Image: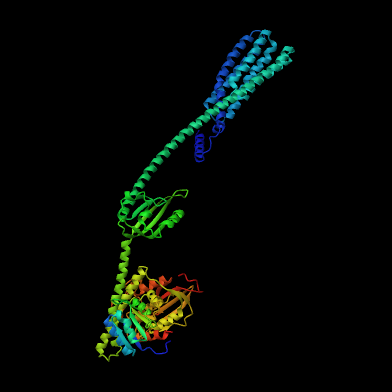
């Protein structure tokens, strides 16, 4: 369990409606600091700049999908150790297992409940080594 | 006669079944028939014998008459006539009642022959001493002639002749021996010798007759066999011709099947060289049959890097000669387009196990696979495209309904709650539809593990408490659940529990109780969910586990639900090797239950 409580989240998501709902959920209910990135192509720079505790990635995005971005992060020294949580509508357990095998900290299936989202993230955070 | 015919028929049948080398003539001929023929021959010669006896006897009577002993001559003549008449009556009787017991006929005949001989023996004995020298010579010649003359008449059965001869010669020899003249004593020695020679000739003749009859019978038998064999052969030829016609007809039918079959069919030899192919094969691969027949199917149609069918694979297949089906193989069309074919190989093997040819059926499934891929893509897209807007809709409504954006007025709050609930229902429907689709297309994979059912039951109570609260229903464990372990997919089992428990909550009256129980029934663990609702309407019972099954649509509108829940539960439980059912609860309400096989000791995981 990390020594500091979860505070800063960076969320890469192209759908603006969902961005807004997640931001509201995390900021208002979860009292977290959130940075939302719409374009996955600039996500790594934004993450370097924001220095989040945890990164949330959408699975399907135009330009670059979540798993590709995740692999890119693994190749970038400054961000390679950040815990990553996928938010995905492809909720089959086989695919979830595949994500975990790739080193993802967790996965939250879409549609998620904004009421419960902060708690879900905190429980993933506390389960980290 | 009938019996003899039967025997021949049976003989033939047995020889037909077990072909052996021709049996010897002796066995082919029926001994009884040969014997009957011998007796018959005796009787046939009988009238001649009687006639000669009468004629010779008449001459003898004339010769001996007049000197003395005329009474004796008369007596002798009467004896002769009597014996002749008796033999003639016997002859007539034999021909009237032809057949029957031939041994009996032979005995009567032998008595007759002995009698005839005895009459001549009487002549020799009585008249020889009492007559003149010239008459003695006459008598001696007469007796010698009559003894020799008996040979053709009686020798069909040699011992009949022997009886006849002895009856003549024995008393005559006695007279010669006791006459007193040394010449006559010498004659008494010679006469029996003469008889012995005659008997031996009769024996030989008798054997010749028997052999002749045997040959005749054997020949008749063979002739009969021959004609029956011919008849059988004719029958077999007709059967063969008929069979040939049938084979030709079924061959034509088969050829037609292959010709009109929508899938490509090749006949190839053990090296894979194409012997024949159907029009569908031409269409599928773009070659005419003249281009492919005589060439290797593997070299022409299978890419060299395809592991199945080529090289070693084919060698092993030819060696095993076991049929193969459902092989998915990449094939090359004439225009180099790659096809995916489902191939079945059927080796044709002769009765000593040698591979003659291989019938190869190729079903081009390229388009089918493409359609499957498109459907999968469609389902996946549909699920994503539908869930994404729903995420926004439900998420927004949920955030409003938490009250964190400020309090809503009562009507507005009610409407946003309705909107959120129905959004959730739409989402459930999508999830259920995707589940049903996956289960029915066999795409749903379960991830079974050892699960403590008691823990799982407690967990589902926690998970579903909030839902039950909405309906004002209390959920509780019935008794203390025993510790039972099953091998199942935990996530899917929770899905089943949620379905059963939410159903129970929906159909309970407000303030009602839903009890969840766990018990062991034989080798199964049984989980039950009991409600105290109004029970299941009888007309709905038979289709409760069907798709879109709901007792009445008003309830759907009031309480939500897709009507797919129990259908999914049933399929999931069956997928995990269990069964699901329901029963009326005593005192009102319904018990839904499922049973899963118990895992008594950890078994080796099969997956």
Residue that protrudes farthest toward the front in the picture = A77
Residue at point 32%, 57% (across, down): B333
Q: Nearer the viewer, residue B185 or B346?
A: B346
Q: Which corner quadrant of the image does residue B150 belong to? A: top right
Up-down: is B125 above or below B9? Answer: above
Residue A127, image x and y in percent? Answer: 42, 84
Q: Quadrant of residue B364?
A: bottom left
Is residue A2 shown to the viewer in this render? yes
Q: Quadrant of residue B385?
A: bottom left
Percent position (x, y) of residue B95?
53, 25
The quadrant in which the N terminus of chain A is found is: bottom left
Position of residue B460 in the picture relative to residue B191 (left or right): left
- Asked whether the viewer can see residue B473, the reply is no
Q: Is residue B238 above or below residue A1?
A: above
In the picture shown, does residue B179 fall above or below A73? above
Quadrant containing the C terminus of chain A in the rendered view:
bottom left
Viewer-closest of B25 and A62:
A62
Give the residue displayed 33% in from the left and 86% down from the top: A49
Measuring from the top left, give residue B347's x and y in whole percent.
42, 53
Q: Between B311 and B39, which is closer to the camera in this rendering?
A: B311
Left or right: B389 as drawn, with respect to B83: left
Residue found 32% across the figure and 48% down from its top: B290
x and y, in percent, of residue B555 in the image: 30, 78
Toward the bottom, the furthest residue is B406
Q: Is residue B583 left or right of residue A63?
A: right
């Amino acid at each position: 369990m990390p020594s500091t409580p979860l505070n800063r989240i960076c969320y890469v998501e192209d759908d603006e409606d969902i961005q807004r709902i997640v931001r509201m959920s995390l900021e208002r209910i979860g009292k977290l600091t959130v940075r939302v990135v719409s374009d996955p192509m600039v996500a790594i720079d934004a993450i370097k700049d924001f220095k989040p505790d945890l990164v949330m990635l959408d699975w399907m995005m135009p330009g670059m999908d979540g798993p590709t971005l995740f692999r890119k992060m693994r190749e970038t020294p400054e961000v390679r150790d950040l815990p990553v949580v996928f938010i995905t509508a492809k909720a089959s357990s086989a695919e979830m297992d595949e994500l975990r095998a790739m080193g993802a900290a967790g996965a939250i299936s879409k549609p998620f409940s904004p009421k419960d989202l902060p708690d879900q993230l905190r429980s993933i955070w506390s389960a980290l080594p | 006669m009938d019996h003899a015919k039967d025997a021949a028929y049976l003989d033939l049948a047995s020889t037909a079944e077990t072909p052996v080398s021709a049996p010897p003539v002796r066995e082919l001929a029926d001994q009884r028939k040969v014997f009957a023929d011998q007796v018959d021959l005796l009787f046939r010669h009988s009238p001649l014998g009687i006639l000669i006896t009468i004629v010779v006897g008449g001459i003898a009577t004339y010769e001996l008459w007049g000197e003395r002993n005329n009474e004796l001559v008369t007596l002798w003549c009467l004896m002769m006539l009597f014996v002749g008449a008796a033999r003639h009556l016997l002859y007539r009787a034999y021909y009237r009642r032809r057949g029957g017991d031939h041994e009996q006929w032979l005995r009567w005949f032998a008595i007759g022959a002995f009698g005839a001989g005895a009459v001549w023996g009487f002549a020799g004995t009585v008249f020889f001493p009492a007559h003149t020298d010239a008459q003695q010579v006459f008598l001696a010649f007469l007796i010698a002639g009559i003894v020799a003359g008996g040979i053709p008449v009686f020798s069909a059965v040699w011992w009949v002749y022997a009886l006849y001869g002895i009856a003549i010669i024995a008393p005559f020899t006695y007279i010669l021996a006791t006459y007193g003249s040394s010449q006559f004593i010498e004659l008494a020695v010679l006469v029996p010798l003469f008889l012995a020679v005659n008997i031996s000739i009769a024996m030989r003749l008798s054997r010749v007759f028997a052999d002749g009859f045997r040959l005749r019978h054997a020949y008749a038998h063979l002739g009969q066999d021959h004609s029956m064999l011919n008849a059988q052969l004719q029958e077999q030829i007709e059967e063969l011709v008929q069979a040939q016609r049938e084979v030709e007809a079924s061959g034509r039918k088969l050829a037609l099947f292959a010709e009109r079959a929508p899938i490509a069919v090749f006949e190839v030899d053990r090296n894979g060289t194409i012997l024949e192919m159907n029009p569908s094969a031409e269409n599928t691969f773009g070659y005419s049959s003249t281009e492919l027949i005589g060439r290797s199917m593997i070299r022409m149609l299978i890419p060299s890097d395809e592991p199945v069918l080529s090289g070693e694979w084919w060698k092993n297949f030819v060696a095993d000669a076991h049929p193969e089906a459902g092989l998915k193989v990449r094939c090359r069309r004439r225009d180099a387009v790659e096809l995916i074919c489902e191939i079945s190989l059927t080796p044709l093997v002769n009765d000593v196990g040698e591979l003659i040819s291989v019938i190869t059926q190729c079903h081009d499934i390229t388009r089918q696979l493409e359609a499957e891929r498109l459907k999968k893509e469609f389902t996946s897209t549909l699920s994503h495209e539908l869930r994404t807007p729903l995420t926004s809709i439900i998420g927004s409504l949920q955030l409003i309904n938490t009250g964190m954006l400020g309090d809503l007025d009562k009507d507005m709050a009610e409407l946003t709650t309705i909107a959120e609930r129905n959004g959730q229902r739409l989402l459930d429907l999508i999830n259920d539809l995707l589940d049903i689709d996956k289960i029915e297309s066999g795409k749903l994979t379960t991830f079974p593990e050892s699960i403590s059912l008691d823990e799982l039951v407690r967990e589902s109570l926690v998970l579903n408490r909030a839902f039950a609260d909405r309906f004002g229903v209390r959920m509780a464990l019935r008794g203390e659940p025993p510790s039972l372990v099953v091998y199942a997919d935990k996530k899917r089992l929770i899905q089943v529990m949620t379905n059963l428990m939410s159903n129970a909550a929906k159909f309970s009256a407000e303030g009602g109780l839903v009890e969840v129980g766990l018990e062991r029934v034989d080798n199964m663990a049984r989980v039950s969910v009991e409600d105290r609702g109004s029970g299941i309407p009888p007309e709905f019972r038979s289709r409760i586990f069907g798709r879109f099954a709901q007792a009445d649509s008003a309830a759907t509108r009031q309480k939500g639900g897709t009507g797919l829940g129990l259908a999914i539960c049933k399929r999931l439980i069956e997928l995990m090797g269990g069964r699901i059912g329901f029963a009326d609860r005593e005192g009102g309400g319904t018990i839904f239950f499922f049973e899963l096989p118990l895992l008594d000791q950890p078994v080796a995981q099969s997956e």
